[in-house]
Amino acid sequence: MIRNNPEVCWLLSLSFLILSCSASKNIIPTAAPSPAGDELYRTIAQMDSVLFNAFNNRDVAKLKTLFREDLEFYHDKDGLTGYSHTIESFIGLAGKKENDLKRELIAGSLEVYPLKDFGAMQIGMHRFCHTENGKSDCGSFKFVHIWKKINGDWKISRVVSYGH
């Protein structure tokens, strides 16, 4: 079960985070309007999609470009980790051919808030599913991503993953 497997919980928390189960889908879920406004909301929803397309397709090179090197990743079970640990965990996941772990953003859960002179805060819930003992095993978890915009590029600087 996902909740009792620390490795799977950590991999699930790679809250990189966020929107589709495959590279061919770029669906932006509908949610209550966020204070961010439509343009910022769409931008962060798209970045979530890019992030989790990389995650779901095990695209390590792309994933590396979406996090700042000063990343702080707060996880309710594993504590605080950084960029190197996060990327190493993803490389480990990507190397396991039998692992079919996929992430999807839960429709309607996405909230986006502007952070003045910094970027945006993304709050939501996502579901991770994988096959365990021949059956689909899924868990839903809460997350917060702090996106920093530098020279037009968006990167995650902070992650808070909880509810495991």
Image: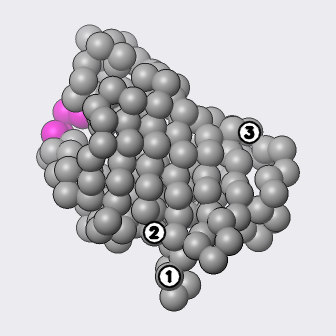
Which is nearer the N-term, disc 2 or disc 1? 1
Q: Is residue 70 magenta?
A: no
Q: Is residue 152 left or right of residue 164?
A: right
- Give coordinates of residue 38: x percent, y percent: 81, 65
Q: Residues within 10 Å of mark 1 (few under 14, many from 20)?
A: few
State which region is magenta: 96-101
Identity, as a three-letter code, of the amino acid under mark 1: Ile
Q: Horizontal placement of 131 versus 159: left or right?
A: left
User: Going from the N terminus, do you reach mark 2 or mark 3 first?
Assistant: 3
Dot 2: few (<14), some (14–19), or many (≥20) neighbours within 10 Å?
Answer: many
Task: Tell me the residue that label 2 is attached to.
Answer: 155
Residue 11, picture quadrant: top left
Q: Name the quarter where the C terminus is drawn.
A: top left
Look at the numbered disc 1 and give the secondary structure of its residue: strand
At 81% from the left and 57% from the top, the residue drawn is 35
Quadrant where the N terminus is found in the figure: top left
Q: Are marks 2 and 3 in contact (CB under 8 Å)?
A: no
Give the CA separation, mark 2 to mark 1.
8 Å
Pointer 3 local density, CA inside 10 Å: few below 14, some 14–19, many at least 20: few
Mark closer to the observer (2, 3):
2
Q: Which mark is residue 150?
A: 1
Residue at 20% in and 57% down: 84
160 with respect to 44 (left or right): left
Disc 2 marks a residue whose amino acid type is: Lys
Q: Residue at x 24, y 24 (%)?
A: 6
The image's mark for residue 105 is: none
Evaluate if marks 2 and 1 touch, with contact meaning CB atoms under 8 Å apart. yes
